[in-house]
Amino acid sequence: MNDLTPTREERIANLKGLGSSRKRVEDARFTQGKGNYVDDIKMPGMLFGDFVRSPYAHARVKSINADAAKAIPGVVAVLTAADLAPLNLHWMPTLAGDKQMVLADGKVLFQGQEVAFVVATDRYIAADAVEKVEVEYEELPVITDPFKALEPDAAVLREDLNGIMSGAHGPRRHHNHIFLWETGDKEATEQALDAAEVVAEEMVYYHRTHPCPLETCGTVASMDKVNGKLTVWGTFQAPHVVRTVASLLSGIEEHNIRVVSPDIGGGFGNKVGVYPGYVCAIVASIVTGKPVKWVEDRMDNLMATAFARDYWMKGRISATKDGKITALHCHVTADHGAFDACADPTKFPAGFFHICTGSYDIPVAYVGVDGVYTNKAPGGVAYRCSFRVTEAAYFIERMIEVLAIELNMDAAELRRINFIRKDQFPYQSALGWEYDSGDYHTAWDKALEAVNYKGLREEQAQRIEDFKAGKTRKLLGIGLTHFTEIVGAGPVKNCDILGMGMFDSCEIRIHPTGSAIARLGTISQGQGHATTFAQIIASEIGLSADSITVEEGDTDTAPYGLGTYGSRSTPVAGAATALCGRKIRAKAQMIAAWLLEVHEGDLEWDVDRFQVKGAPERFKTMKDIAYAAYNQAIPGLEPGLEAVSYYDPPNMTYPFGAYIAVMEIDVDTGEHEVRQFYALDDCGTRINPMVIEGQVHGGATEGYAIAMGQEIAYDEIGNVKTGTLMDFFLPTAWETPHYTTDHTETPSPHHPIGAKGVGESPNVGSVPAFSNAVHDAFRAFGLRQSHMPHDHWRIWKIARNLGLHG
Ligand code: PCD
Ligand SMILES: [Cu+]
């Protein structure tokens, strides 16, 4: 070996594989304005669509007159439900088994609902024409409160369902009721609660909010009538599903539809669902034979596309006097808005909410969820949490705090004595999940130690004394959270979307000179898949990640996949990628054996090569092998080196974490300052620590927004009060707290590389941490529960109601 021969360590480093903080390859184009987003797509003769939207939350549509609009030069068409009805496209199926109006059919059910679609030669002409469409409305009584919606004499919202007392998820017991979904052992739970020494009961509300990605939703549809091909570019988090649904709805054969998700400026769940804008753009393109672009503005996005949360969670939790939890009972009233358009796996109308036993070994539990219609926008998307998991984590982490108050116990200690122990994994939860792996005590101790928990409690006790003595007007809150997530949907046997099983896929093609392209069924919205999936492949096949292109989002080239949301890319497509790499390696081994004239079994894999066992100086690198695969006639082997894998995960993955927020709260102004935020995540094997850190910063900032100010608020008559970024809180660098990140690493036993998802964890963990900090600051003064978002006004009111303003 001369000095120029790389050492084994150097060879490993050169791969930039698993565990390397490789810089994100996509950032070169993002930071230089070279991204390619939907709105960057410009085609000759392209038309532009815009919606006439309802100003009312509930009204009958008496008439629509588009004559004045059509008279404007440049206006090509104005579509209404009457135009779509002959095609049977005036309503469309939702992901949750309901149906939704594409354009108002006789009535409108929420403010901002799509009433007519104007198509014009220019975006501004379209907007002007929208103003000229005359719609005559007759106002109807508005319901924005899900509890009032279920009163016997409440107005009938969904007249189309009148008399139909059974829906996609079973019986409906009232005209505004959608479903009751139940799991767990109700009777045993009630019995345990009745027999318990201590019971804490609380209503925990997780308010309505919105993912609000920086890029709004949009599409460009282009029908090529000569070749019979429809191409649809869009901000889709699941392009293949869009293709299949478009084919089923339009009757165009699936091979004649190409769906492309180009660069996406943030998804956060907002871009999972199907929106009327997509349908209208496609129909308009089929009708006019021209490409049609529809891109929302910010108000459209906040008012009409998918919201998140809006869960009223009534909880009861019981324990022995010394704090061992004996049962958990939860009833949710879920406000789904005007149509049930929740984005969940079909069989789970409340998503994975039943992960709500959290990190704790709770012997019996029960959950019942009532879905309810109101005059609000439809949706119910994950917003950075796999299917209602953030609601579940918020619920249990608030219930633990309330129980700690009831027991007069330290909340950190209460958690510790109830954690599922390391030796209990795989763990069967009372609500039916099998947690794959975890080591909660280690993570918890590390977190408490890192923030000097004991010291913080002493400081807090001193602060309370000083406050009472009139020496300070600021309180100190210590917000604890230990969350367990469930991500990576999911086994095909119980997870599907509209009947399509939730597997995922990867295809790898090695080029003769030892570089490669990989294509996946997922689609990055900013997560950095082009960077990280190449790292998985690099470690599997021994080519540098820098020599591997990762491509996603084009249904004409990518293998079929279910898309990116619910932190499923790493658990599902990541697994497919690793296994696909292993298929390549298996063939490479045969080629190497032939080249080295030894038996396959005499070879061993080492970093980037196959070498002869006991004679490591005799080897062929993956680069040599790739060349041979295309340039040598190898007996018994077909030329080429490529593979494809479809992966159906045996289980979901269960990442977890310990988050602690330390907050100063000004009792007189209601202002807060996040003094410290510590986030420990365990996502199993870490692919790219820097990307993970970025995910935690982003997710915790969204969690901060949600906990401390962000909400979609309605007034009594259903007006959206937060339809602009002046009213809807998006933190800037000014408000964003400083984060300290940390980790433990407990691999998933069933994932080929042991990785779990991480993208959503920081939202799931941070919301309760921030909220618990606010509650904890006032615990000594008698606060039990106060609803988010904790904006200055609400915090000020807490202080006032507790009599702290003197
Ligand atoms: N262990 C591990 C895991 C993971 N990772 C990384 O990290 C990331 C993430 O991952 P995940 O967890 O798997 O996930 P995904 O699937 O990929 O994604 C999804 C998510 O992601 C997150 N993040 C983000 N970021 C950005 N930038 N943008 C966006 O949009 C977003 N979104 C959000 C959300 S909301 Mo949903 O939709 O709600 O359901 S869901 C979600 C990527 O890159 C990966 O690779 C690593 O490294 N390692
Ligand atoms: Cu969720």
Image: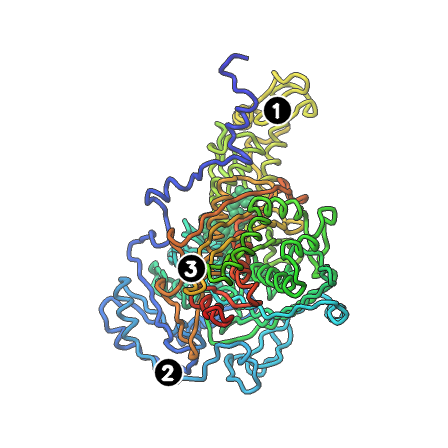
The tag earlier along the polypeptide, 1 or 2, is 2
Q: Among all residues in the image, which is located at the extreme left?
A: 73
Cβ of mark 1 under 8 A from ligand 1: no
* Tag 2 residue: 137
Q: Residue at x 48, y 68 (%)?
A: 804
Q: Secondary structure at mark 2?
A: strand
Q: Amino acid at mark 1?
A: Phe
- 128 displayed left or right of 706: left
Mark 1 burial class by Cα count in 10 Å: few <14, some 14-19, many 20+: many
Q: Which mark is residue 212?
A: 3
The tag earlier along the polypeptide, 2 or 3, is 2
Quarter assignment of residue 603: top right
Nearer the observer: mark 3 or 1; the answer is: 3
Q: Quadrant of ligand 2?
A: bottom right
Residue 281 x/y as whole percent: 38, 63
Q: Nearer the viewer, residue 792 or 758?
A: 792
Residue 271 x/y as whole percent: 46, 58
Structural distance between the alpha carbons of marks 1 and 2: 74 Å
Q: Nearer the viewer, residue 537 or 224?
A: 537
Q: Secondary structure at mark 3?
A: loop
**Are discs 1 and 2 less than 8 Å apart at CB?**
no
Q: Amino acid at mark 3?
A: Cys
**Are discs 3 and 1 less than 8 Å apart at CB?**
no
Q: Residue at x 57, y 44 (%)?
A: 450
Structural distance between the alpha carbons of marks 3 and 1: 49 Å
* Tag 1 residue: 610
From the viewer's perspective, is residue 636 above or below residue 325? above
From the viewer's perspective, is residue 782 above or below residue 629? below
